[in-house]
Image (tube, rainbow, N blue to C red):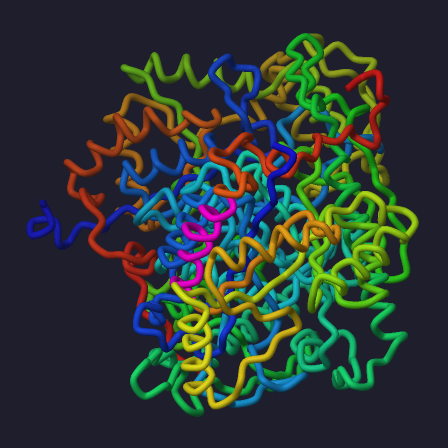
Amino acid sequence: MTDHLHLAVALDGAGWHPAAWREPVARAGELFTARYWAGLVAEAERGLLDFVTIEDGFGLQSTLDDGHDGRVDQVRGRLDAVLLAASIAPLTSHIGLVPTATTTHTEPFHVAIGIATLDHVSQGRAGWRPQVSPRASDAAHFGRRSFPPLDPAALDERHVRDLFEEAGDAVEVARRLWDSWADDAEIRDVATGRFLDRDKLHYIDFRGRWFSVKGPSITPRPPQGQPVVTALAHARVPYEFAARNADIVYVTPRDRDHAAAIAGEIRGIPGGGGTVRIFADLVVFLGHSAQEAAERKARLDELDGAAYDSDALIFTGTAEELADLLLDWRGAGIEGYRLRPGAVPYDLKAIARGVTAALRRRGAFRHAYEAATLRGLLGLPRPANRYEEASTT
Amino acid sequence: MASSTAGARRRVHLAAHFPGVNNTTVWADPRSGSQIDFASFVHLARTAERGRFDFFFLAEGLRLRELKGRIHDLDVAGRPESLTVLAALAAVTDRLGLAATVNTTFNEPYELARRLATLDHLSAGRAAWNVVTTSDAFTGENFRRGGYLDRADRYTRAAEFVQLARTLWDSWPPGAVAADQESGVFVRPGAIGEVRHEGAQFNVHGHFNVPRSPQGHPVIIQAGDSDEGREFAAATADVIFSRHGTLEDGRAFYADVKRRLARYGREPGDLKIMPAATYALGDTDAEAAEHAAEIRRQQVSPQTAIAFLEQIWGRDMSAHDPEGPLPDVEPDLEGGVSQGRVQVADRAAVVARWRSVAREKGLSIRDLVIEMTGRQSFVGSPQTVARQIEEFVTAEAADGFILVPHLTPGGLDDFVDRVVPLLQERGVFREEYEGVTLRDHLGLRAPGRAA
């Protein structure tokens, strides 16, 4: 059991390659329908994957670092990821659902009750990927703050630090709100006429630089107690954010040594670095042979007019080769993977069918879902409520 | 279908209100289920869809209510985030409209517009937004900006918010997504419009990132009753959720609001008026009256009676026996003991009225509260209730009703099983859904694109 890898898949549009929508099997005209997404997640669930993530953002996808690029040959537009995850919940039964929700321009209270609600409607399968929104163009969609245009080559360190500090506060608020109702706060005591035991409801009284939130939540404690918080991180500041606030961090090693170095750095961060689960992100293009996989990517590159590049390592090869790589990196401290399918549905199917089968042959992946909640699948216990005495839980 | 003979008859529209966070919802009844389990939402939504209702409706409350400085513990409390639970319901229903109440004070237009457009996509055209405003600093304590909004600016912000949301929805024309794999054109050149909004409440520049949704604009519902609220509804809403329960009040309100429409170039049919309505059924009218009285007693427990009195009197009344007579205690005219709910406007006048009713009828505190607060809109046999509903609609006191059941989740079962078939027989309610979108159900036109 403990030898099993954790495997997630990151869903975004027609896949991570910008020309993926042009594959004949891509169902490009259905990207904004519930049916399309339900089909993708059903495929992932048939493969017994731990969870899916869903990307989101407050601006159009772009080839520019900041702002609309005006391109018409790539997918533009996306649905709200939390709502998308919720619409999939009743149609699935075991797989975790982890939408992205931005912390920069949103209300922490709304995000917290949205994720709590996702946990209720999925009966304990919700996660959250908090994401910062550094772009000036996104900020202009809200008009409450103005940011400098984003230039990855010359990051404004204070701006970045502020965004992640704010994200940390947003996660803290969410975690407190999720605990602000004891599990047994609802008493329905006819004798005293009380529906609630108000002593089991807690003001969170959060005060921070960006917001203050009084609480308690309006939504009872989620089934998991605390939905699973996950974060993508590429550098020191986000590593610290993830270590301190998240249950899972997605990292982007270039190779095994790099993976070991990143894992070592995260493990050394006080206040959570020792316990956060470390997953590696990989973009995958699969094929029956390594050559076929490489040709698939090359064909898409040609359609797009540029060689696809990514923050994560791009893997092209067979399911067997990928399974070997995944197990190899495990020795470097990687406990699970979030695979980004290059093109959907092809690479999603190849992951859910081929890669899982290859891992099973190596004794490294489940044969059946062993738990009904996402925390259960990840081996995370249901946490005690921070506001309740240990003796009462 | 009786539609050919019923051409002249006005059609009834019906919506199902998920039992709310207030004492209308009876939790002490053994049949009362969970307020938060998704199964409860599924039950009520599927019942409403089985009854061919126009839509399912969720209210909003962004802070737990307080009484005397402490969390109010007598009524049901705890609810999901509305749009999230509606998105989940979209997957298990097919035609039912899905309406969320969402505040314009503690949300931002770009974010809310895309969440609403998303719900419309996920439900294939069944989303509705009940636009509410607040200036409440109490609620504001849960949000970034606190109680920033002056009461006088509530509708200014709401109006600008809705207008901006419509601009964002219109910024993708129909058919903007080509998704043409052959030519490689995903989105038609120049289709995604640039939005440049500068107003008193919002400055929003850029590009919306959700394609135009099936309804173009989700259905807009409005619930305010003030003169300002009525004007706002006449200018922008598709449905008014009103509180005018009697035939005379309803007719006056209906005439007033429909009269205002012409000013905005709109037809009477462009705005549907749907008051909230409670009901109690029985095999006979007498049995229904008995049942109605039982429900009212359940709704007003002894503790709830005292809590009501405290809200009206504006002071602590916990020393008094709820089954005893109304005490001779003066109200605290300056005071206020509750937070997070509508405040008593003219305390002295309300107290005088309550006193005179108690004296006249010789009522205990609890019976007085039951008398003053609990009356159901429709009480009778299924035949009586069906006839009353038709009368209201025929008399132009309403276009239909938003039904508020007192039990979760089975509170509409009897209405759908026993009243809906009678309304259908009378030819005033659909036997099958005739369209796909909520706009179809309500007989609303497609929204025009802003110039």
Q: Residue at x 23, y 26 (%)?
A: B383
Q: Position of residue A359 (x, y in %)?
A: 52, 46
Q: Position of residue B426 (x, y in %)?
A: 16, 38
**Residue A346 is covered by the magenta coloring:** yes
The mark tally for this picture is 0
Q: Give the overall secondary structure of the magenta segment.
A: helix
Q: Is residue A32 visible?
A: no
Position of residue A374 relative to residue B199, above or below, is above
Position of residue A64 relative to residue B330, above or below, is below
Question: Which quadrant holds the N terminus of chain A?
Answer: top right
Please name whichever residue, B146 or B265, is drawn nearer the observer in this view of the structure.
B146
**Residue B144 is covered by the magenta coloring:** no
Outermost left residue: B5
The boundaries of the magenta stretch are A344-359
Please name whichever residue, B433 or B414, is drawn nearer the observer in this view of the structure.
B433
Q: Position of residue B102 (x, y in %)?
A: 58, 54
Q: Residue at x 56, y 78 (%)?
A: A60
Q: Is residue A160 visible?
A: yes
Outermost right residue: A270
The quadrant holding residue A14 is bottom left
Question: Which quadrant holds the C terminus of chain A?
Answer: top right
Horizontal side of residue B260 vs A239, given as left or right: left
Position of residue A155 relative to residue B236, above or below, is below
Q: Residue at x 65, y 34 (%)?
A: A2
Q: Position of residue A308 (x, y in %)?
A: 54, 80
Horizontal side of residue B133 vs A361, given as left or right: right
Please name whichever residue, B224 or A87, is drawn nearer the observer in this view of the structure.
A87
Please name whichever residue, B59 or A28, is drawn nearer the observer in this view of the structure.
A28
Horizontal side of residue B20 vs B64, given as left or right: left
